Amino acid sequence: MKIIIIGAGEVGRHLCDILSEDSHDVTVIEADEGLAREIDEQFNVRVVSGNGSSAHVLQSAGVKKCQLFLAMTSDDGTNILSSSIAKAMGAEVTVARIHDRTYHESEVLNYQKHFGIDHLLNPEALTAVELAKSIRHPGRVAVEYFARGKIEVQQLKLNAQSKLVGTPLKDLRLDPGIRIGFVYGKERQEVANAETVLREDDMVTVFGSAEILDQTRRLFKPELDKQRVTIVLYGGGDTAISLVRLLSHPRFKIRIMEPDPDRCEQLAEVFPHVTIIKGNATSLRLLEEEQVGSADYFVACTKDDEDNIMTCIQASKLGAKHCLLLINRADYLQVIDRLKETLGLELVVSPRLATANQVKRYANRKPYFVLANLPGESGQILEIRVQKKSSVVGMKLRDIKWAGPCVVAALLRGHEVKVPGAEDEVWAGDRLVLIAANDHAKEAVRQLAP
């Protein structure tokens, strides 16, 4: 795949490394001549010295034949402008790295659509998703956020008190915005269908938006209404803001420690339901005064790695049940990850790695991507791009005769994402997120992408 990367900073450099190792044809555009020379010497990539927002420079880099364009500088404006120009000049897929959440807002203007960019990628938001997965679903087997983060899949265990026990799926009055995809229980593993009857202790895979699934969880486990999870965040930056939004359910009681008084005021205005504590969590006295040791989760997510590491260690020693750490610097990540058990850390996340993992999806040459595996390797969750030659093009979902049992959980069309209904049609270029048993996954791929 021919790939152009704008920016040779830490993220761009890491992408050069992993994408060139995967045998992609990579061109890097960098305005700083010193950085450009370093990249040229260290990696097997083509380097162009110049402004990535210049149509002339993009043309000389071969943007007309570019299959994946990645604008990865630290400046949002540069990334948006260069991606928009690249798309207009013929780049097949464009991705802009952005930090400002404003560009994700679409109530007044859909920035992504306006500028003609295929994907907006926010490292802080991706990092928050990784943190939220551990907090929202401890002990999960497979929990992911699919369809550009708008569709989540949860695995819920059905208990004896649930009203769903003994009821076939066709008789359940569930929100139309969710989909039950797979049922894993005693002596059975099956892709769900209208006749599937739910039983006590079944593990049920459910798709939908986070908000709808939070409400649905109570139908499976009524006692969840009584559970409260206490969370302490150190740092009130972009990652923390994204994380609070993902943990907006009343069962999460959140406190944020932030030393900057101006930032504290801003956070208090945006999140009136969150307790804001002005102070530095590197102070052991403050951690003790705020009873951090009794917290269910302590998350250190500032931009200072040393402070994040030390506060997590302190919180763990004080008794916090789960300590989650954000690491920004690449050279710290490998060492900390190896020592996390010794240091009392449950999870170490990196914005750089989260960004790289997302980009690798975009760079996938195949028309499908395996998003996750189901319990016991019994099935897969796939994202498949519908090809023009597919026999299902133009058909409604209810009329498709699948090669084997599968459930369509999400439909991505342009900038639209939704849990589809039986009357929705499938068009060429659509991306379907579907769940299929292992025996039939390959047939489903061939049916949509022959």
Image: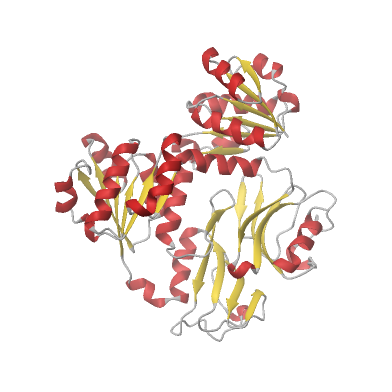
Q: How many marks?
A: 0
**Can residue 235 be seen?**
no
| Front residue of 301 and 423 | 301
Residue 227: x and y in percent read 33, 70
Against 160, residue 157 (above or below) is above
Task: Please give left or right for residue 331 compared with residue 383 in the image.
Answer: left
Residue 267: x and y in percent read 29, 43
| Front residue of 41 and 320 | 41
* Location of the N terminus (image quadrant): top right
**Can residue 162 be seen?**
yes
| Front residue of 293 and 152 | 293
Residue 361: x and y in percent read 63, 44
For image coordinates 71% across by 24% down, the residue present is 63
Outermost residue toward the bottom? 166
For image coordinates 19% across by 41% down, the residue present is 279
Against 165, residue 289 (above or below) is above
For image coordinates 77% across by 49% down, the residue present is 428
Residue 257: x and y in percent read 24, 45
Task: Please give left or right for residue 151 compared with residue 389 in the image.
Answer: left
Task: Please give left or right for residue 176 compared with residue 392 in the image.
Answer: left
For the rendered model, the colour scheme is secondary structure
Against 444, residue 170 (above or below) is below
Task: Please give left or right for residue 62 compared with residue 373 in the image.
Answer: right
